[in-house]
Image (cartoon, rainbow, N blue to C red):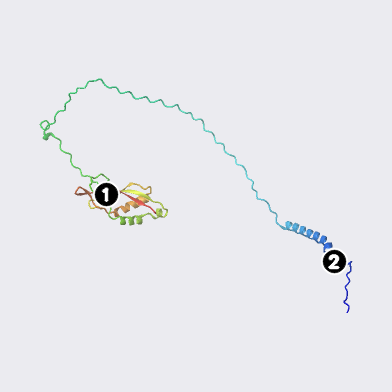
Amino acid sequence: MNEPTTTVDPRAESANDRFKSDFSSWFWGSMIAATALHFALFALLPEMEAEDVSFAMEDIPIIDIPPEVEIPPPPEAIQRPATPVVTTATIDEDITIATVTFEDNPVENLPPPPDEVETDISAAPVFVVTTVKPGLINGDELQRALEREYPPLLRDAGIGGTTIVWFFIDEDGVVQNQQVHTSSNHQALDEAALRIAPVARFTPAYNRDKRVAVWIELPITFTTR
């Protein structure tokens, strides 16, 4: 059986030929459409203006130059001190001091001794002779009082300082008076140090075998560590 044969017309236009023939119209059509779309977008978008960044120059004031200062003349030179000269006066080398005797100065004619005036040494710091100094015996309790009396505002701000306090200690080692010797430059810390002072306890001070009341100085330091 004979198979049917297909005859191709050489004059028939292929798909590639149709694409080539339509390319020009498609290309220019798309270019015209894109251009029209861009113009439409520019026409519809709001107008944008650049911000005014201009500035005006301010007049710079002219500073008056101070008048020229007249320099005073240098001071006069200090005169040299006079050269010491050895005197030529003669001195009698036979100088004697009269002997003081009770015959020439009887006891009846001597002035009476001055009256003894008792002074209150607790009023202000004074020097007292001691052979044994007092010692602090309750340091832990004093430290707890220091932490309790530390002003909260200064503690939270990390502000510290040292106040040197004068303590007047009686014969039993008890603090009877206190006053600021050197300030910490913070009044609140100084006042806190004075409140802490009565808490301190000391061993008695001695002058040989006798207890004595004395003034001592003790630094009280506030720190946040």
Q: CA distance from mark 1 to mark 2?
A: 125 Å
Q: Is 27 situated above or below 221?
A: below
Determine the residue positioned at 78% across, 60% down.
30
Which corner quadrant holds the N terminus?
A: bottom right
Most distant residue in the front direction: 1
Label 2 SS: loop
Label 1 vs label 2, nearer the camera: 2
Q: Is 204 situated above or below 86?
A: below
Residue 183 in the image: x percent, y percent? Answer: 35, 47
Most distant residue in the left direction: 103
- Tag of residue 210: none
- Tag of residue 168: 1
Residue holding disc 2:
14
Q: Nearer the viewer, residue 136 or 69?
A: 136
Q: Earlier along the polypeptide chain: callout 1 or callout 2?
A: 2
Which corner quadrant holds the C terminus?
A: bottom left
Residue 139 in the image: x percent, y percent? Answer: 30, 55
Q: Residues within 10 Å of mark 1 (few under 14, many from 20)?
A: many
Determine the residue positioned at 78% across, 58% down.
31
Q: Is 88 situated above or below 170?
A: above
Residue 152 appears left or right of 45? left
Determine the residue positioned at 34% across, 52% down.
192
Residue 96 in the image: x percent, y percent? Answer: 16, 26
Residue 92 in the image: x percent, y percent? Answer: 19, 22
Q: How many marks?
A: 2
Q: Are marks 1 and 2 in contact (CB under 8 Å)?
A: no
Q: Is 11 situated above or below 59?
A: below
Label 1 SS: strand
Residue 140 appears left or right of 209? right
What amino acid type is highlighted by mark number 2?
A: Ser
What amino acid type is highlighted by mark number 1?
A: Phe
